Amino acid sequence: MKNSANRCWAIAGLFLLATLGIYLGGARGPYMADDFPNLAHNDALLIEDLSWQSVREAALSSPASPYGRPLAMLSFALNFSIAGSLEPLSAKVFNIFLHLLTGMGVLALTLNLLPHLRLPGGRRMGPRHIENAALLVTALWLLHPLFVSTVLYAVQRMTILSALFTFWGAAAYLRLRQRLAGRIREYLELACVVCLFTAAAFLSKENGLLLPGFLLLLDWFCFGLRSPPGAPQVGRWIWLGTLMVPVAFVLLYLLRYGFLHWDDAPLTNSFTVQERFLTQFRALAHYAGWLLLANPEPMSLYHDDIPVSGSLLAPPATLWCALSWLGAGALAIRLARTRQVPAFCLLWFLWGHVLESTILPLSPIFEHRNYLPGYGLLLAIALAAQVGAQHLELRPLLRRTLIVLLLVMLPTSLLVERVEAWRDEREFVIHSLKQQPDSALTLLLVANFLASNSEYDAALSALRNAQDRDPGEAAFVLAESALRCEHEPAARFDPALAARLESLTVDGFRTPTARRQFVVMVTGCLRSAGNDTTLLPLYERMQRHRHDGVAMYSLYGIGAALAHRGDGPGALRYWDEAVANYPQAKDLKPQLERLRGQLGKGN
């Protein structure tokens, strides 16, 4: 038995080495999108001393979440402080090693899980088949091309760490659960382990709170949610409460959010809660297709070219996807009564999406949301391949070769192709434009690349195309303004651009992309004194924005405009207000002090 386990882990080591070799080819790629506010422009991650203040600032320096995701940010601080810079290479290499460690968690979980699961017909798998299936799902998970935009998108370490603690927490739970007997101490130990792994996953990213739900699912399919014989009553309450209370909290939170905001106008994105919920039926279909390598639409960083569902019939695919998922869910619940493995796989996938792919006002589609839920469908593929191969009238070696070719070599070839596109900015931009020519966000990416290479006219053309594709998105107007300010700081905006800026309202700044581009525009237009008459009214409107980053930079922009007009005291008043009211304004202090000194000399 020991030799068999050693063989299993040795073969898994080969998969780990193959994954490492492929991914290292893309580790020198550039930062993307959310990497910039979280990492590239975050000097708090370069810790020069181990004081409590420095560590605390680094841990809470992410603007991605009100909870700060401190564990993930501390890992970045460790990265960058050792490397001595905020360059992306060290962050991406560390992401790759975390991906490998998470893959080992997938293997550990699967080896502990499969002996308990029942195949259709009530059969259980033998030890050799369990090892083969565990190796197959681990290889599929490590080498799946969908996860490139998680591993090589540096800021998605938050997702990786949350999944890492979830997989290893689930494996640890199964081991401890089998040893439960009649002592309360064992139940307390189990509860402490669950709480520890859940806290670590949550402090990396909020969907770590789903871990107890996954454990509840594991317990139902592996042990029937039955407490061990002779279990004390207090132990039962500790055990069930540890699992069920977080699950109830998640479900009640979602119900409360939906009840309070179902009929609200869009506040944080360009869609309502209803539209977001309906769109997710189609999003889940896309995710399942990509995981099963059956979706013809390309994998990409952005998927804003997939329209939001306005109703069940707009587009009509919404209704078909909704009916399909409702049917699949009903079938899973029916099969769950006899604890069959297809139900487990589907319920794992659906529970993994319950936070990010239901009603919360997040962007409708992102590939990295499948990093943890995808395990369910990949496990289903591996087990279906194992069962199907046994019915083929082929020699065992030929059957194994066929499975490896279809389920390992095919995704590996796609992985190599996709990693190649992430190895440098130029390749990534070309690949993205080829894959998603109708994506406005991809055109923004193209414009930024062209502008950084001094191709000003081409960058402007890309931004105007983006505005044509998504005229309701303020980000592209702001990006054009920033580009004009940086390229021709003394020139005034043309009337058409000025009119578009004047039409922007607080409600028009709903998306994260618009908020990021507003910051870029403010900093890029600080020297553009000729456009104060257009920008100052915009800044004055935006200082009432509910998002702290927009409000803070609005104050900064107002101060700069007043400084251009010679109103030094007024400028300092707004800058000091920004620093006093918004903790994240600490990064502005050096610039403010320099401007304060310049104004002092002028007086």
Image (spheres, helix red, strand yellow):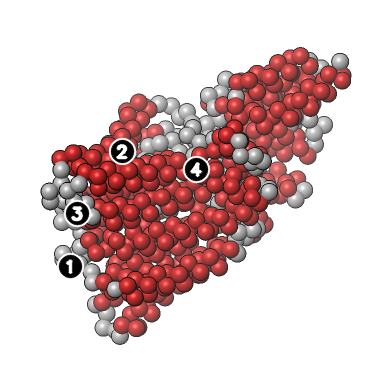
Q: Position of residue 45 (x, y in %)?
A: 62, 41
Marks 1 and 4, how far apart in space? 42 Å
Identify the residue shown where x is 57% and y is 43%.
Answer: 34
Instruction: Inspect this view and state whether residue 574 appears.
Output: yes
Q: Which numbered disc flags the more N-terminal residue, 4 or 3?
A: 4
Whether residue 41 is visible, yes or no, is no
Give the quadrant of the C terminus.
top right
Picture residue at 39% right of the left edge, 33% below the top: 273
Question: Nearer the viewer's eye, disc 1 or disc 2?
Answer: 2
Mark 4 highlights which residue? Answer: 71
Residue 49, image quadrant: top right
Q: Which residue is mark 1?
A: 123
Residue at 82%, 31% in the rendered image:
490
Numbered tag placed on residue 490 in the rendering: none
Query: Type of residue at label 2?
Result: Pro
Mark 2 or mark 3, which has the lower sequence index?
3
The residue under label 4 is which amino acid type? Leu
Count of marks, rendered view? 4
The quadrant in which residue 358 appears is top left
Pointer 3 residue: 223
Check disc 3 and give the amino acid type. Phe
Q: In the rendered structure, which disc, 1 or 2, sits on the residue that comes first in sequence?
A: 1
The residue tagged 2 is: 246
- Kind of residue at badge 1: Arg
Using the numbered discs, state the Cα–Cα distance from disc 1 to disc 2 in whole angstroms.
33 Å
Residue 475 or residue 316, whichever sits in front: 475
Up the image or down, 515 lies above or below 299; here it is above
The residues bearing labels 4 and 3 have C-alpha atoms spaced at a distance of 33 Å
Which element type, helix, strand or loop, lies under badge 1?
Answer: loop
Look at the numbered discs 2 and 4 and tell me whether their residues touch, using CB distance below 8 Å.
no
Would you call the spot at circle 1 few (<14 residues within 10 Å), some (14-19), or many (20 or more)? few
* Of the image marks 1 and 3, the number of the one nearer the N terminus: 1
